[in-house]
Each structure stands twice: as C-alpha cells, then as structure tokens.
Amino acid sequence: MKYLFSAILLGMCLILESVSYAQNDSNDGLVLTYNPPKNLGELNAGQLKKLEARVMTILTKNGIASQGEFSPFIVTPSVNFYESEVVEGLRKLYVMKGDFGLTVGLKSGEAFTSETVEIIGSGTNEAQAKNNFINKISSKANSFQDLFSQATDEVTTYYANNCDQIISEVTNLRNTEKYEGALIRLLSIPSYAKGCHAKASTLIAEAYQEYQDRNCERLINIAQSAIALRHYDAAVGALIQINPQSSCYEKSLPLKEDITAATQNHYDNMWQMQQDILQSYTTILQAKYQNQSGSATPAIHIITPVQAAGTNSTVVYNTRVAIHGQVINAQNAQKLFIDGLETTWDSEGEFNRTLLLDTEEKTVRVEVISQSGNTSAKELYLKRSSNSTPDVVNQPSVNAANLTKVALVVGNNQYEESALRNAVNDALSMESALASLGFQVTKAIDADSKTMREKIPAFVAQANRADVSLFYYSGHGLEINGINYLVPVDNATGGIDKYININEVLEKIQSSSERDLNVVILDACRSSNFISAKDAERIGLATISPPTGTLIAYATAPGETSSDGTSAEGNGVYTGQLIKQIVLPQRIEDVFLNTRKAVMERTNNQQRPWEEMSLNNVFYLKAN
C-alpha cells in the first residue's frame, strides 16, 4: 500500500512541476504549439514526421518553448514544390525546387507573421529528393530569427490589446468552477507582456487554491464511495490528491486510517475464503467420483459467494453478486435456473451468473431439473453489507447526477447499397436510455455527409465543455489502412475522402482532468457484403488507443462483423443488450462486460464485443 501512496504522490509532484516549468518558460520568451500542416499530400507520413522534427529543432535553437497546452499561439510549417526535373546521366537525378515557410499566429486561425525560404532537394528518386529537401532546412540558431522577433512583438501587442478580455474569461471560468482552464489561461501569459503578466500573477494563487478546495470535497466523496465498495486503491488514489492546504484536508485523515484497518482485515479474510473455495471443489470431486454409474441424480454445489461462518446467509458488498457453482452429475441434468433465469453450464458442469441485488436482502433459488423431470434446489440468502466506515457515503465514486452529460447519437439505415434494418431503431433506443440518465442528447437519423459533418464538430465543441460525453454510432463502418471510417447514407459507394474519419473525431475530443469520462460506442461493421465490395483493408474496425479518461466500445472484435438483428427483435444484438445494461447502477466497465457476456451467449460466441479504455476513476452512469 505504501508504494501506491508514493507513486501517486510522485505523479502529483510532476504535475505541479510542469505548471512551474511552463511559467518559467513563458518568462524566458515565446511559447508556441506545433501545428501540423494541412493539405500536404505531396509528403508521406515519414516525411511529415521528419518535417516536424526539423521545425522543433528550429524552435529549440531559437530559445522557443513548445509547451503547447499552455499557449494560444501556433507555428505552422508549409512546403510548396513549384518545379521538378529529372537530370539524365549515369544515374537519373531527381531535383525538387520549392519554398519552405513558417507562420506564427493564433490557434483561432489569425496569422501574425510568416517567413519563406527557397530550397532545392535532390536524390535518385522523388522520395529521396523530398527527404533531401527537408534535410536542407536550416536549423541554425539564427534561422528565422527575424520571424520570431517579429512574432514576439505581435504577441506582446496581442496581450496589451486583449488582457482585459483574458482576465474576464478567467473570471468566468472561476465562477463556473473551471479552475484548471483558468490556470492554464493565466499560465500562458509570458513575462514580457508585463502589464498583463502582473495581473495574472496575482490571480494564479487564488485560482489554484479555489481549485484545490473544490476538488477536496469531490475527492473525499470518491474516497468514501470507493471504501464502501472495497475499491481501496481507488480510495487511496483520491485521498493522495488532496492538498494539505485544502479546506477539507482534516476529513481525509480518518479515511486513511480506515483504509489501513480495512485492508488488513481484507487480506486476513482472503485466506479463509480461499480455504472455503478449496473445500467446495473437494466436495465436488468427491461427489463426482462417488457417482460413476452415470445414473445418479444431478445436484447443485455453490462455490461462491461463500456462506458466512456460523450463519445461513452470505454477505455481499455491492449491488451485483456473481454466483459460481457446479452441477454435480451434469450428464443427467436437463435445465438449470438461477433466480428464475435459465443458465448454461460447461463440460465440467460449472456455471456462472451475475445478479443485481436490488434490495437489502434477497433469497435466490438455484435449481436443476434432471432428464427425468425431478428437481434439486438450493437457496442462497443474500444480504447487503451495512458495515461501512463513519460518514461513508454509499454512492458511486463519481456522482453522475451532478455532472454535465452530452451525447450525440447517429443511426443510419437507408443506404443505397446494403440498407440496414435496425440501425435507426438502435439509435432511438439509445437516445431514450441516455435521456433517462440525464444526458442532453442530439440525434442524427439517416444522416448524409453534410449532416454528419455538421453534427460531429458541434458535438465535439459540446463535449469539450461538458463533464461526460458519449458518442454513439449505428450503421456501416470500415477500416482502411488502419483508420476507421463511418459511412454517411449518401456516400456508401464513395471513395475514402467521402467517409468520416472517426480517429480524427477522437483526437478533437480533448482529454481534460476536469471532465470525468468520454465514451465512444461504435455499433458498425454490420454487413460483410457491404464491406467486401469496398476498398477496406479488412472486415471490421481497427482498435484505437484511447486517450486518458476515454472508453471506446465496439459491437464486435477487431476484424469481425456484428449482427443487425431481425425485424421482429427491433434492435441489433449488441445495442439490444447494451441498452439493458447501461441503465443499471453498475460501474461503466461492468456495463460493457455484462453486455459482452450477454451478446456472446445470445450469438453462441459468434459475436464478441470489444472495449479499449483508459479511465481515471471508478465511474457509474447511474447511482445506486
């Protein structure tokens, strides 16, 4: 446990150091963000990387910092080849003439100043000539010196003219408790903008203290909830972030003591539980080998949850309870029911079923019916634990009710080629489920290219102002060269430039520690007939590495297709199960885990949903 405390403490120190470093850099001079050039189709991916490295070297040698998240200013390179020729000789020599330029301006698009130089590159082929062109871009200390000097003057003028507006924006951010945004805005003001920098300096400490005080109560609630759910690592992760100068720091001290005591008891009890489970398996094996005749009556043995010693009940600590057991003499069993739900068993007779414990106490009947129709049953008496630490709030780690939640739901049926049956129904069902959870939902039904290109950027803007964002897409999708594309209804037969690049959408939904969660759900790849007719690299979507705080869910595993369902069902298999799980009070990862189990059971393992996630907190869309 002490190592976990140390690791998180180190992380917090690094965050504070980065804030200090950004302020120091702004004191030294200009701070710019590298802005990747657009429409440079003449350069391949490797050449674009080489170009970026060359520009970053130019910035470094000119004393320009590049902590982009703290600066509203960008530097954008440009390359324009205006002449090329092939010189004949013993070996052909390709010669490329062109201009290389740098432009400094605002992220909003306004350009301050630019400078261009002429360069000639050569090589034995066109690619080598372009590489040589990039290599000839000078990165000496005096390169583009006049550009950066003029840019510094423009930035100084910008802050002189806009300081009052910036301070007003910071005030609005503080008033709406967006303290991190306020701090980033203040820290971006360089020292050479003297008047504005002086105003910012007086506000930084105030905004940081407000941020710590606001976060303190939130972190206390997360820790209390995590302790109640026995998620001790999550509780520690919350408590260690509380600044000793925060207003509620004293409240965190008893919780740290509770964690120490609880974890000791937890590990003491683990041994006894393992012994009980081992005894259960021993009982099963004895029963199995005592009945080799093949005609013995099937019976039930429960492995977990383990019955509390000296009682006839089992205490559970969550709203969900996993029941694991075995049908003894399963070869003579016909059906198995757990709490009225028909349940399957494997070749060894073992079964699993997760139930929602929606009351303080519940009796669960587990019964097996033999081939001859006889019934053997056991009853489990489940009781929710009332053992919690003082002042513990038995609520989700992050209280979804208090967060701003936005969603965009897209469902496309009416393709000219390979129309779908249930994509629109799925989108409408998802809209209803999300609305019941308090989401502000925007929907697009049978969206053409124009509609999708309008709705998605508008949603991205909403997402970057909200605490929780969710993007749901139901329709055709495909992968081309490792990139995932969504297909508008009017562009099913179009080229790659007509599709919607989902990777770019994800990049624009910026990660922010002020926002708890981003969810992207892709119920695509519904028709292999559609995809095989296109230029897709393979059937299905490619996995995407999620940014921090993001969960990406796929209706099926990479390289596979998902079922569109039947007209009688009204929903595709995946979304039909997801809308049942998403409204239940369970962790967000459990929503998709239980959806996956249900889909695999429903499709006899033919469809395997998939998730990629990088979450910061234990998170519930619906409170218990």
Image: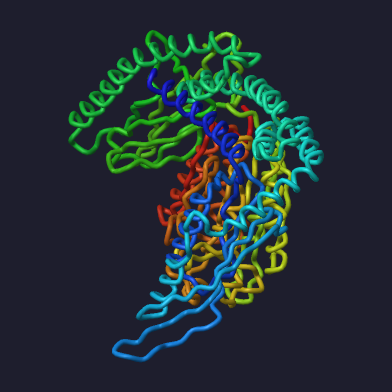
Looking at the picture, tell me which residue is in the foreground, 66 or 295: 66
| 522 in relation to 200, above or below | below
Q: Toward which corner of the image does residue 466 lie, by quadrant?
A: top right
- Asked whether, in this view, residue 65 is left or right of residue 399, the answer is left
Number of numbered discs overlaid on the protein picture: 0
Q: State the residue at coordinates (48%, 50%).
A: 599
- Asked whether, in this view, residue 106 is left or right of residue 355, the answer is right
Q: Please identify the quadrant where the N terminus is shown.
A: top left
Q: State the residue at coordinates (59%, 50%).
A: 33
* Name of the residue lying farthest toward the bottom: 88
Q: Toward which corner of the image does residue 326 lie, by quadrant?
A: top left
| 494 in relation to 211, above or below | below
The location of residue 246, given as percent across then percent down, is: 63, 16
Q: State the residue at coordinates (47%, 47%).
A: 612
Q: How is the image coloured?
A: rainbow
| 273 in relation to 326, above or below | above
- Asked whether, in this view, residue 165 is left or right of residue 506, the answer is right
**Can residue 134 be seen at all in this image of the molecule?**
yes
Q: Please identify the quadrant where the C terminus is shown.
A: top right
The location of residue 92, given as percent across then percent down, is: 35, 87
The location of residue 303, given as percent across then percent down, is: 34, 26
Looking at the picture, tell me which residue is in the foreground, 228 or 298: 228
The location of residue 335, given as percent across then percent down, is: 40, 41
Looking at the picture, tell me which residue is in the foreground, 112 or 271: 112
Q: State the residue at coordinates (33%, 27%).
A: 301
Looking at the picture, tell me which residue is in the foreground, 461 or 325: 461
